[in-house]
Image: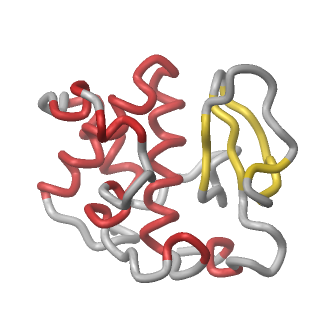
Amino acid sequence: MAVVRTTNQDINLLARLLRAEAVGEGKLGMKLVGAVTVNRARVSCSDFEGVNTLQEVIYQPNAYEAVEHGMFYQRARGTEKRLARRAVQGERRWPAKYSLWYHRPPGDCPATWYGQPLVGRYKLHCFYEPAQGECEEVYTTF
């Protein structure tokens, strides 16, 4: 059962995002991007108030750099579609389990990013959860 409302178009959109954002980080890297994206659609706090659907999350201004590049606009492949379906069904893994942000710095992960604490790194991406008390709803289970 999906933890966010989706259509086949949403699955394709998320699959394209996974590939464009993290194909170089392998399947787990793409799963982590999917978890962060679904987390953003599930909450209504911080940067994500009023952003309720996957489409709104993905096209939110400045949310994903990949949306501005050509790979995002290529057709989704079966592998990415399967990973997207797993993400919308609530599959979350550390360090993205409760993360709402990630980025790829040129070097080490900063301890905080725009005031949000670092929870971990996977390959080249650093993951950040909301600061204590800022967005408690991300910690709810499905």
Residue 23: x and y in percent read 40, 23
Q: Residue at x 49, y 65 (%)?
A: 40
Q: Please report the residue visible at 87 percent of the width from the left and 44 percent of the height from the top.
A: 111
Please tell me which residue lies in front, 99 or 59: 59
Position of 81 compared to 46: left or right? left
Q: How many marks?
A: 0
Q: Nearer the viewer, residue 96 or 59?
A: 59
Name the foreground residue: 30 vs 101. 101
Residue 58 image position (x, y, % from top left): 34, 55
Q: Is residue 32 above or below residue 46?
A: above
Q: Quadrant of residue 74?
A: top left
* Colour scheme of the picture: secondary structure
Residue found 30% across the figure and 37% down from its top: 68
**Residue 68 sits above or below residue 91 on the image:** above
- In the image, is 139 to the left or to the right of 60? right
User: Can residue 103 be seen from the camera position used here?
Assistant: yes
Asked if one can make out residue 82 in the rendered structure from this viewpoint, the answer is: no
Tell me residue 42's x, y (percent).
47, 73
When the figure is inspected, residue 40 is found, relative to residue 63, above or below; the finding is below
Given residues 106 and 31, the one toward you in this image is: 106
Q: Residue furthest top?
A: 24
- Quarter holding the N terminus? bottom left
